[in-house]
Amino acid sequence: MPRKHITVTGRVQRVGFRYHVYNLAQDCHLTGWVCNLDSGEVVIEVQGYQEHIEQLISSLGKGSIFIRIDRMEIQDCDEIKESGFDIKHE
């Protein structure tokens, strides 16, 4: 299964973005996690079918007038064993 590490910058904290990502991941049947960084960025790791990952990525900026994505960096990652999608609180 493909796995992607996505770093998102913009207005993505304090606007419900992590919960938006969580719901999208659930709808797309993806595993992984999402987490806020102290820098103001949000990091997402998702794993699943490529078309489902692409669906999540294309939907990230939709869903709230408060969310604004300025940039996304997407990198491939190694597949890991996991069973769900989590919101990390670090």
Image: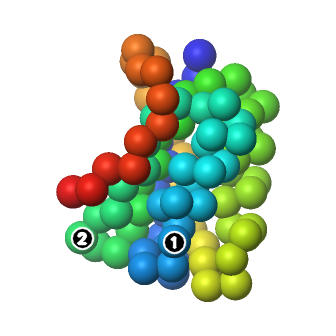
Residue identified by numbered label 1: 16
Which residue is drawn at the image coordinates 59% and 61% (left, top)?
20
Which residue is drawn at the image coordinates 24% and 70% (left, top)?
38
Is 5 situated above or below 30? below
Q: Position of residue 62 (x, y in %)?
A: 74, 68
Disc 1 residue type?
Gly
Outermost residue toward the bottom?
66
Disc 2 residue type?
Asp
Q: Which mark is residue 38?
A: 2
Is 62 situated above or below 33? below
Q: Position of residue 18 (x, y in %)?
A: 48, 61
68 and 31: which one is in front?
31
Quarter of the picture containing the N terminus is top right
The answer to whether one can see residue 57 in this image is yes
Q: CA distance from mark 2 to mark 1?
A: 16 Å
Element on which disc 1 rests: loop
Q: Residue 90 appears in which quarter of the rendering?
A: bottom left
Element on which disc 2 rests: loop
Which residue is drawn at the image coordinates 61% and 84% (left, top)?
66
Lower sequence index among marks 2 and 1: 1
